[in-house]
Structure formats: C-alpha cells, structure tokens
Amino acid sequence: MADTLTVRQSGHAAVQDLGRPGRSRYGLPVNGALDQYSARVANALCGNDDTDPLIEITALDFSCTPSTDVLVAVTGAPADVTVDGIPQPQWEPLAVRGGQTLAVTGIRLGLRVYLAVYGSIHAESLLGSCAPDTILGFGRFLRPGDDLALRAQCPPIGHPEFRHPLFRIRPPRPRFGESWTIDVTDGPDVAEFGDSAGRLVSSAYVVTPSSNHIGLRMSGPVPQRAVSGEVLSRGVPVGAVEVPAGDQLLVLHRGRGVTAGYPVLAVVTSASLSPLGQARPGHTIRFRRRTVAEAVAAHRAERAAIRAVRHRAAAVLQSLDIPVLTRR
C-alpha cells in the first residue's frame, strides 16, 4: 500500500494546484490556488514542482496524520501550526513523524493556508490540473477520514541537534493584515469613466460576504461611467475590476467565467492576485495604479524570489541526502 496522509479535521480544505492556464480559449476558468505565491513557495520548500498538488486550507481548522515520516511546509496566512500539540514554524520545511498529528488552526489576518508534502500527493487530474471546478463538476472538498496517497517516500531525516531548528531557509513572506494595497493597471474601458475613474485609487473599499473564488464584491465609492450604451459581452481576464450597475465593484478572480458584459475599469496585476486571494470579508482594499512595465517588473521579481527559495531549499535537502524531485 502507498503511504498516506489521513485527514482528521477537514474544515474547508481541498487539493489544489496552479489551475488550468491557457484553457480560457475553450471557455474554461483557470481556477487553482488563489494565493499562488504562497502555494509556489510551499512546494519549493519541499523540493516539489510549482505545479504539484498541495492542500489549500480556507479559514477553518485542519488536521491530518501521515502514515510515515514526511517533510511538509505550511505557508500562507498566519496560523497556529502544531505537531502533536507542539508549536511549529510556518514558511520553513518541517519534519513530521509517522503517526503524529499535524494541525493548522486559528487562521488569521488572511484567509488561506497552503500545506505541501515532499514528493506531493496523488490527485485526479482533468485537462492537466487537479484544481476543483464547480462548473465542470470536478473535484470536491476534503472530508474527515480521506486518505491522500503520497507520491514519494521521504528518506530518514537526521537531526544533529534537536534543540535547534533544522531548517532556516527564510523565504520572503508577504505582509498580512486587515487592509490590503492591490496594484492595478488601466482597463480597456477606463476612458469611459472620465474624471470619475480616479475614485478607484483615491478611495477605500470593503470586501463583502458575497465574495468567493469567482470574484470579490467590494462596497465603497463606485466610479460612474460618463457614457451611456450597453457593453457587449467579451473576454475578460482574471483580475478584471468590473463596474456593474449598483453600489459595488466586482473584481474577478481565478474561478471567473471567461466572458462578461460589464465595463472593465482596471485589471489587477499578476503579483497582486495572491494578496487579493487572502482578503477576507470585512477587510479593506486600496487600489494603486501601476504601468504595465511596473506590473511586469513586479511579476518577474516575484518569480525570481521563488527561484531563489527553490535553490536554497534544494541545497539544504541535498545536504541531508534527500533527493529533489522537481521535473525541470
């Protein structure tokens, strides 16, 4: 039998990866982890590929027990991470013995936590991804008693001094809190809002409870179109800041439909999609305008930071005679 990770308390967790990029041309949402920076770093800390499946834990407490010794990493929003009740660090590799219970509780200042396991876990795939999709009816939330099969067994980890932490990779951590600054570039319809477009970057908005992985609804001073006429349905990107009729903004996220008919005032930059995925209902959002060149530079800097984490983690794992299992 394959070694497993047995779910004890499931909360609101699911097996995720980075989704289905490039499938929008076929009318499919991209889906995948909403905080992709945290997901990528969790996998990098375990020596996995960026695209390997991991567990996305949303808001509620989660616990599991491995059947064998494993190496894991817990990233994302601040939370209380324990192994058999003993506090453990986030954002570092963590050795868990077979039969011990790993618990993630008290998620705060954000919404989502990511749990990666060395070698990753087996998961059903659809169109190249294990990401759940409610439209396709694929995937589900985890339940207590679920056994997740591990793809690889972690070699024994020798620890020279148990009173000292074994790993100190220290990847860059995002700032978490109850207010978020989200970078945007101008959308295709910004000219239709005239001077009113400036409200987007000069005002504060509050995330409402009707938000989900498809999009976030935000209350606040809504910019008004200076022209009349209906907007024809067309393709819209992840991160589109739409202005529907009414008193709320709609910011599309990774589960969005690929077409819409609302004017698009702005588009959230790639680097700001991850913090947007951590915003809870009641949190405050402020938008900051950026040029396309600035958005591209921020995206490249984030990817470079993840590559640096991957190199440091690989060096540490190899020094412990743990094979790095990345495929590229």
Image (spheres, helix red, strand yellow):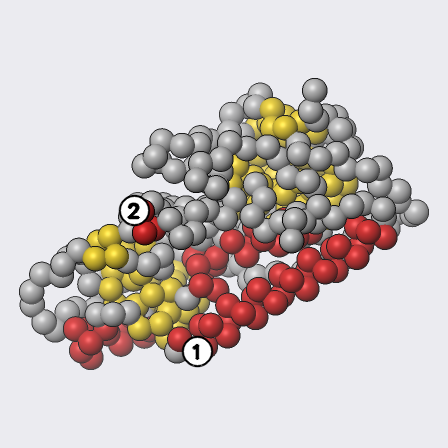
Q: Which residue is mark 2?
A: 27
Question: Is label 2 in a helix, a strand or a loop?
Answer: loop
Report whether residue 250 is seen: yes
Question: Is label 1 in a helix, a strand or a loop?
Answer: helix
Q: Residue at x 46, y 46 (%)?
A: 19
**290 shown above or below 236:** below
Residue 287's x, y, as percent?
Answer: 37, 69
Residue neighbourhood size for the residue with mark 2, other residues' Cα within 10 Å, grouped as few (<14), some (14–19), many (≥20):
few
Residue 122, image quadrant = top right
> Considering depth in this image, is 72 or 178 the residue closer to the camera?
72
> Considering depth in this image, is 39 or 200 the residue closer to the camera?
39
Residue 55's x, y, as percent?
Answer: 56, 39
> Considering depth in this image, is 168 or 4 the residue closer to the camera?
4
In the displayed image of the protein, which residue is found farthest to the right? 160
Disc 1 or disc 2, which is closer to the eye?
2
Q: Residue at x 12, y 73 (%)?
A: 226
